[in-house]
Amino acid sequence: MIETVSSHFSYTEEYVLDHSLDWVFRKYSQAHREMWEQSTIRTQEGFKSLMLVFDSLMNKGRNFDSILPPTYEKAMELASDQQEQESEFIKGEWWLKGKSNSLTT
């Protein structure tokens, strides 16, 4: 367990041993979760690569856009759109419109 934590986070073993047992267990579970996520990502990338090859052979590459992940800019745009839809805040300058109406009359 100590070797896993020290190698995954690039800590020395002495540094890990200086911490509490709870801290070591948290870091150990975090390291395992990160290693599992990295393995899952590598597996998904492998399957996507195979899908791209089969799509180029069978479908002449018509579905490349649906297989590949979106660009960084498109992903950020989609994330901001989703946050705006979930937001309960009123957009705009409604407070200024009411003040300007009352000031001009």
Image (cartoon, rainbow, N blue to C red):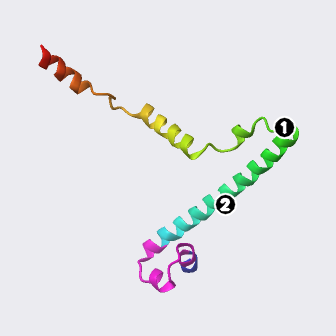
Magenta stretch encompasses residue 14: yes
Drawn side of residue 20 relative to residue 72, left or right = left
- Callout 2 secondary element: helix
Magenta stretch encompasses residue 12: yes
Drawn side of residue 35 relative to residue 85, left or right = right
Vertical arrangement, residue 92 with respect to residue 77, above or below: above
- Callout 1 secondary element: loop
Residue 42 place in picture, x, y as percent: 69, 58
Q: Residue furthest top?
A: 105
- Nearer the observer: mark 2 or 1; the answer is 1
- Image disc number at residue 60: 1
Count of picture labels:
2
Residue drawn where x is 32% and y is 28% of the image: 92
| Majority secondary structure of magenta residues | helix
Which residue matches tag 2? 39
- Circle 2: residue type: Ser
Vertical arrangement, residue 86 with respect to residue 11, above or below: above
N-terminal label among 2 and 1: 2
Residue 39 place in picture, x, y as percent: 67, 60
Nearer to the camera, 65 or 4: 65
Q: Residue furthest front?
A: 104
> Which stretch is magenta?
5-24
- Circle 1: residue type: Lys
Vertical arrangement, residue 83 with respect to residue 36, above or below: above
Vertical arrangement, residue 46 with respect to residue 52, above or below: below
Residue 87 place in picture, x, y as percent: 39, 34
How many other residues sit within 10 Å of disc 2, few (<14), some (14-19) or many (≥20)?
few
Residue drawn where x is 22% and y is 26% of the image: 95
